Image: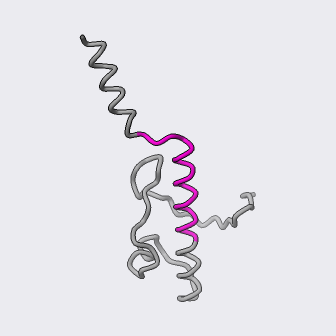
């Protein structure tokens, strides 16, 4: 009986998880949305936001998207500047 309970519990827990492909798709879209918000903010204000919350307060994003890996809006903002297709050096 405990084996059946364990299998049922595992099925319920794993049923809510996204596949790797879905996580990557969601992450890609969220990053594009963040980048678009940052670029529009910069175009309007002449400089980038100090924090991602600035994008929400100014109406460039409805909310900060959740990191699909952590499930929280806990993005780390760094000073490294990358463009799509470039690599950090």
Who's the residue at 29% across and 15% down the image?
Answer: 4
Measured along the vertical axis of the image, is residue 4 above or below residue 49?
above
- Asked if 83 appears above or below 8 in the picture, the reply is below
Span colored in magenta: 17-35
The picture places residue 80, in percent across and down from the top left corner, at 64, 64
Taking the view exactly as shown, the residue that stands out farthest to the top is 1
Give residue 57's position: percent from left, percent from top. Answer: 38, 79
Number of numbered tags placed on the structure image: 0
Residue depicted at 40% across the width and 50% down the height? 71
- What percent of the width, then of the height, locates residue 41? 53, 82
Tell me if residue 4 comes above or below residue 57 in the rendering. above
Would you say the magenta stretch is mainly helix, strand or loop? Answer: helix
Q: Residue furthest left?
A: 1
Residue 41, placed above or below residue 71:
below
Image position of 46 (left or right of 54): right
Is residue 23 or residue 49 the one in the foreground? Answer: 23
Res. 39 image quadrant: bottom right
Q: Residue at x 59, y 86 (%)?
A: 43
Residue visible at 52% across and 75% down? 37
Q: Is 19 covered by the magenta stretch?
A: yes
Q: Quadrant of residue 15?
A: top left
Q: Is residue 46 magenta?
A: no
Rendered-image quadrant of the N terminus? top left
């Amino acid at each position: 009986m405990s084996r059946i309970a364990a299998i049922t519990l595992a099925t319920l827990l794993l049923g809510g998880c996204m596949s790797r492909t879905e996580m990557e798709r969601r992450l890609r879209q969220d990053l594009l949305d963040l980048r678009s918000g940052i670029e529009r903010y910069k175009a309007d204000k002449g400089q980038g936001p100090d924090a991602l919350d600035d994008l929400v307060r100014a109406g460039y994003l409805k909310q900060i998207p959740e990191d699909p890996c952590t499930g929280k809006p806990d993005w780390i903002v760094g000073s490294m500047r990358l463009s799509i297709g470039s690599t950090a050096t």
